[in-house]
Image: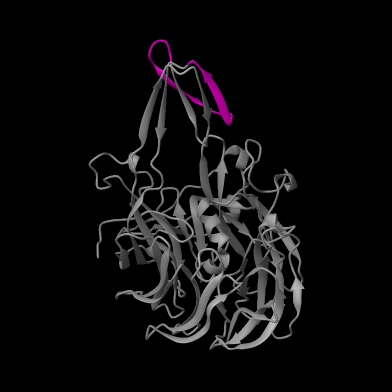
C-alpha cells in the first residue's frame, strides 16, 4: 500500500478518485459565468436560505471539495490533483504523472465519502516542423490559437473563431500532437471523513487497472466496486470500508448490482458478452463472500441494473415468457413471482425510495423510428395495483427520484431549434453543442411537470447520466430535503470550455445559480 502517489480519470468503466491527507475550510468567492451565460444570483436569498446536507464537488483543479448549497463552508478533501503534467515543473514530484479525482460516493450516514484515484503517465507531445509548404488547412478545435511571427521577430497569438482556415505559403508550420489520455500507472480507493481533518484511508490499490464504479453497503461497513482486471475483463469486488483485503465475488466483462437494505446480501448482474446483453444474474453473501443463488446463467437480460425494493422483500428484473420480455417482480431469493408489464427493448428502472412504485424507461431498439431520441417514455408503475402511468412529456434518457418519493428529476435530449432563447440554460450564440438536455421535474402524484434548465452536461456528468440506473444506486443530485437539485454543465465560448456546478430549486420558483466551477457534483443523503 502506498500513501504518497495519486491517480487519473477514465471513462464509463474506468474512473478516478483521491488522495491527500489534510484539508481546510474556506469561504469560496462567488463564481461568475461568462456574460453570455449569466444567471441571476440573489445574495439576500443565499444569506437566509435553509441549508440541507452537503455537496461533494470535483472542482476546477480536479480536487474533491465539500461545500454547502450556496458554494460556502468549503472543505478541501484533496489538494494535489494534476490534470496536466506539462504544467508541473520538471523534476517535481509529478514526474510527468497526471492525478485527478472523480466519482465521490457518500456513505449512507453521510459521515464519510469514498472516491477513486487514478494515476497515469502522460505521453510527451510530439512536434513536427514543416518548411516551404504552399498552403496548409488548419481544422480548429476548442481553444485553438494561431501563432504568427511579425517582421521584427516577435510572435503573436491570434484567437481562432472559424472551424477551419487555409494559410497560403507559410514560412513554416509547427504542429504539436498530444500523446492521448495516458497510460494508467495505478488506481486506488480512499475514504475520508467529511470534516477534512483526518488522514485519508486507502482501502484498495491496483498497480495497473482503473476502477469503474463503487458504492457503500447500507450499513456503512463495506464498499462494493467494479475493478478492471484486463482489457476486457472486470470483477465485482468487496472491501471493508475501514481496512482489509479486497475479495472478488464474480468476474466478467462488467457488472451492476444492488445491496439488500441489511447490507449483508447483494444481487448482481455480471455481463459475459461484449456485443450482446448476455449475463449471469445471482445473489451473493457479502459477509461470507460466496454465491447464495443463481437466478439466471448466460441469459439475455434486457435490463440495466437490478434493484432490491426499499424493504428488501423483492427484486426488480426482467423475465421472458412466450417470447415476450416483461418487467418482473421476484422475491428476495430471485424467484419470479409475477410479470408486471411487457417491455420491448432495454429497460432501466428505479424504485421509489418510500413505496412500491417503480419509474422506468425503455430505450428504443436500434433502427426504430424514434431510436435517435436516445431515451424513452417515462412510466410510473404501481407494483401492487399494476397501474402503469405515462409521466413524461418528452423522451427521457435519465432520471433521479427525490428522497421523499414525490418528484422525479428527468433529463431529455432536445434539438437546438427546440430551445427558447429566454429560457435559463446554456448560450447557443457562438456554438451549437452536440448534446443538449432539458432538465425538468415531474410530480409523480399529479403528473405536473416543470421545465427548469437546458444544458450541455460536463463530461463526468454525461457519464453518470449514460448509466444513471447504475450510478443512482450510490449517487444523487437531489438535496436531502427534496427541495433542490445540483448538476454540472460545460460552457464553451469558442476559445475553450469550462465546467460549472449549478444548483436550482426543484419547483423553478428561484432562478438557478452557479455555486462552483467543477465537473461533477453529488448531494449527501442527509
Please name the residue shown 50% across and 85% down the image: 294
- Magenta stretch: give its range: 150-169
Residue 488, image x, y percentages: 55, 53
Furthest residue in direction top, as rendered? 151
Query: Which residue does the image show at 71% across and 57% down from the upper left?
Result: 451
- In terms of depth relative to the viewer, which is nearer, 222 or 249? 249
Total marks placed: 0
**230 or 101: nearer the eye?**
230
Q: Quadrant of the N terminus?
A: bottom left
Q: Is residue 148 above or below residue 218?
A: above
Residue 257, image x and y in percent? 50, 75
Residue 315: image location, x then y, percent: 58, 82
Residue 74 visible, this angle: no
Relative horizontal placement of residue 44, taking residue 193 as reference (left or right): right
| Position of 188 relative to 455 (above/below) | below
* Residue 476 falls left or right of residue 40: left
Whether residue 385 is visible here, answered yes or no, is yes
Q: Residue at image x 52%, y 37%?
A: 142
Q: Which of these two is toward me, 177 or 31?
A: 177
Whether 152 is among the magenta residues is yes
Amino acid at each position: 500500500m502506498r500513501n504518497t502517489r495519486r491517480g487519473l480519470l477514465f471513462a464509463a468503466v474506468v474512473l478516478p478518485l483521491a488522495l491527500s491527507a489534510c484539508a481546510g475550510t474556506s469561504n469560496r468567492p462567488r463564481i461568475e459565468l461568462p456574460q453570455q451565460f449569466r444567471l441571476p444570483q440573489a445574495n439576500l436569498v443565499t444569506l437566509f436560505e435553509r441549508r440541507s446536507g452537503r455537496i461533494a464537488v470535483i472542482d476546477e483543479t480536479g480536487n474533491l471539495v465539500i461545500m454547502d448549497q450556496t458554494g460556502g463552508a468549503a472543505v478541501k478533501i484533496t489538494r494535489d490533483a494534476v490534470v496536466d503534467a506539462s504544467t508541473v515543473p520538471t523534476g517535481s514530484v509529478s514526474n510527468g504523472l497526471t492525478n485527478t479525482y472523480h466519482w465521490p460516493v457518500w456513505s449512507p450516514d453521510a459521515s464519510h465519502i469514498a472516491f477513486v484515484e487514478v494515476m497515469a503517465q502522460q505521453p510527451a507531445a510530439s512536434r513536427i516542423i514543416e518548411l516551404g509548404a504552399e498552403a496548409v488547412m488548419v481544422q480548429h478545435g476548442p481553444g485553438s490559437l494561431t501563432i504568427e511571427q511579425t517582421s521584427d521577430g516577435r510572435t503573436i497569438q491570434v484567437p481562432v473563431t472559424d472551424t477551419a482556415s487555409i494559410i497560403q505559403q507559410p514560412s513554416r508550420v509547427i504542429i504539436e500532437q498530444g500523446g492521448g489520455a495516458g497510460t494508467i500507472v495505478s488506481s486506488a480507493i480512499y475514504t475520508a471523513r467529511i470534516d477534512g481533518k483526518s488522514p485519508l484511508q486507502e482501502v484498495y490499490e491496483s498497480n495497473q487497472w482503473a476502477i469503474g464504479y463503487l458504492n457503500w453497503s447500507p450499513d456503512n461497513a463495506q464498499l462494493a466496486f467494479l475493478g478492471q482486471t484486463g482489457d476486457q475483463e472486470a470483477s465485482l469486488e468487496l472491501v471493508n470500508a475501514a481496512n482489509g483485503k479486497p475479495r472478488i465475488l464474480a468476474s466478467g466483462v462488467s457488472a451492476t448490482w444492488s445491496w439488500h437494505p441489511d447490507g449483508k446480501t447483494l444481487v448482481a448482474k455480471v455481463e459475459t458478452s461484449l456485443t450482446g446483453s448476455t449475463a449471469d444474474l445471482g445473489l451473493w453473501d457479502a459477509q461470507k463472500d460466496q454465491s447464495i443463488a443463481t437466478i439466471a446463467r448466460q441469459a439475455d437480460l434486457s435490463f440495466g441494473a437490478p434493484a432490491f425494493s426499499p424493504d428488501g422483500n423483492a427484486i426488480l428484473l426482467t423475465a421472458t415468457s412466450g417470447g415476450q420480455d416483461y418487467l418482473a417482480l421476484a422475491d428476495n431469493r430471485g424467484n419470479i413471482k409475477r410479470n408486471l408489464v411487457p417491455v420491448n427493448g432495454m429497460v432501466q428502472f428505479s424504485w421509489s425510495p418510500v413505496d412500491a412504485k417503480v419509474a422506468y424507461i425503455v430505450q428504443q431498439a436500434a433502427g426504430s423510428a424514434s431510436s435517435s431520441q436516445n431515451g424513452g417514455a417515462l412510466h410510473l408503475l404501481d407494483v401492487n395495483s399494476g397501474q402503469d402511468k405515462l409521466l413524461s412529456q418528452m423522451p427521457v434518457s435519465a432520471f433521479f427520484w427525490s428522497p421523499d418519493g414525490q418528484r422525479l428529476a428527468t433529463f431529455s435530449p432536445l434539438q437546438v431549434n427546440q430551445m427558447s432563447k429566454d429560457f435559463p440554460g446554456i448560450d447557443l450564440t457562438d456554438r451549437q453543442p452536440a448534446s443538449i438536455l432539458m432538465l425538468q421535474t415531474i410530480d409523480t402524484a399529479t403528473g405536473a411537470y416543470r421545465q427548469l434548465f437546458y444544458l450541455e452536461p460536463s463530461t463526468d456528468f454525461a457519464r453518470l447520466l449514460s448509466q444513471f440506473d447504475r450510478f443512482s444506486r450510490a449517487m444523487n443530485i437531489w438535496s436531502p430535503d427534496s427541495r433542490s437539485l445540483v448538476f454540472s454543465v460545460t460552457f464553451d465560448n469558442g476559445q475553450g470550455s469550462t465546467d460549472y456546478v449549478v444548483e436550482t430549486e426543484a419547483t423553478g420558483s428561484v432562478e438557478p445559480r452557479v455555486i462552483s466551477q467543477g465537473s461533477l457534483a453529488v448531494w449527501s443523503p442527509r
